[in-house]
Amino acid sequence: MIQRAVLLSLLLASVAAGQTRRVVAISHRGEHLHHPENTIPAFEEAIKLGADFIEVDVQTTADGKLVLSHDGTVNRRTNGEGKVSEMTFEQLEALDAGIKSGPEFAGTRIPTFDQVLELARGNIGVYVDVKNASAKDLVSHIDGHGMTDHVVIYCGLALAKQIQALNPKLKVMPESNSVEHSKVLVEQLHPKVIAFSARDFTPEIIAVVKDARAEIYVDRMGITDAPEGWQSAIDAGADGIQSDRPGPLVEYLRLKGYK
């Protein structure tokens, strides 16, 4: 009888622990498998699916406007050609960023960072992947939309320091690629969250980050973007998973009590 009571207590404790641990779902470039990546339709769909963050790639135009584009050129995803950094916002705004995803998305425009921050406010967090933008511009836009507490900023050490100097409340999220580098990041930035790709998601590096009490956001794409890959990441210590399949990921996290 006592043994059964002990087992029941352990089971209840295990269930409670599972319910209290939270793992966030990060929608890579929005829901981009069925919508044009880095566009408003992709982000709206990610919100509908229940993702916790949308990942956005920020670039700066020739006239200083912050816009979204994963690539340094517009060639792959629009009906135009050219480097984002050498084009004005007016030139970019004239491009069709949806037609290559299907006729139903014809006329979709490259969004500005401001538009996305406004869409996200009160609806979803923003995982900012800095491709080409200054610390000053990033901080002013994020703070200006009241999103300071709802973003993480993926960037290198130097830019992270600049951002922290302007607003220490913002969560910078450097990527760890070795034990030694992780220790430097922890010592110099004291980050609340650190990013991991598949290649650096190793027990030794994870231990350094966990010892620093920082959260871990890890990529799960390709063959690992499935329940087995998600669970292995969670078991290894992930607090957030970036996925190309936000819908199934959200469903899985809910089913397992992580969301």
Image (cartoon, grey):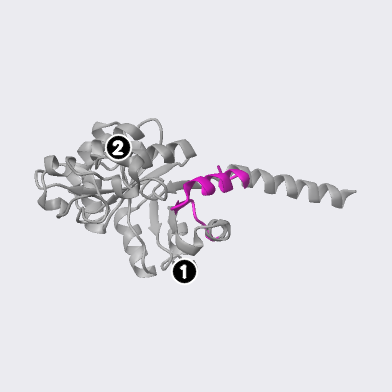
Query: Disc 2 vs disc 1: Cβ atoms closer than 8 Å?
Result: no
Query: In the rendered structure, does residue 123 fall within the stretch colored magenta?
Result: no
As helix, strand or loop, the secondary structure at mark 1 comes to helix
**Residue 100: x, y in percent?**
30, 50
Pick whichever, 21 or 10, lies toward us: 21
Query: In the orientation shown, which residue stands out farthest toward the front?
Result: 103
Determine which residue is flagged by label 1: 204
The residue sitting at 34% across, 59% down in the picture is 175
Viewer-proximal residue, 197 or 46?
46
The 10 Å Cα crowd at callout 1, few under 14, some 14 to 19, many 20 or more, is few
Q: Nearer the viewer, residue 205 or 80?
A: 80
Identified at 47% across, 68% down, the residue is 202
Q: In the picture, residue 138 is in which quadrant?
A: top left
Pick the front one: 106 or 236? 106
Residue 239: in magenta span: yes
Which residue is labeled 2 in the image?
A: 116
Kindly identify the amino acid type of the residue bearing the numbered disc 1.
Glu
Q: Identify the magenta region.
A: 236-259
The numbered disc on residue 50 is none
Going 50% across and 45% down the picture, which residue do you hit? 247
Three-letter residue code for mark 2: Val
For the image shown, how many numbered marks are present on the structure?
2
Secondary structure category for the residue under label 2 = helix
Q: Position of residue 182 (x, y in %)?
A: 36, 63
Quarter of the picture containing the C terminus is top right
Q: CA distance from mark 2 to mark 1?
A: 36 Å
Disc number lying in front (2 or 1): 2
Name the spot of residue 74 as percent of width and height, x first.
21, 53
Q: Position of residue 133 (x, y in %)?
A: 19, 49
Label 2: how many Cα within 10 Å (few below 14, some 14–19, many 20+): many
Q: Quadrant of residue 144?
A: top left
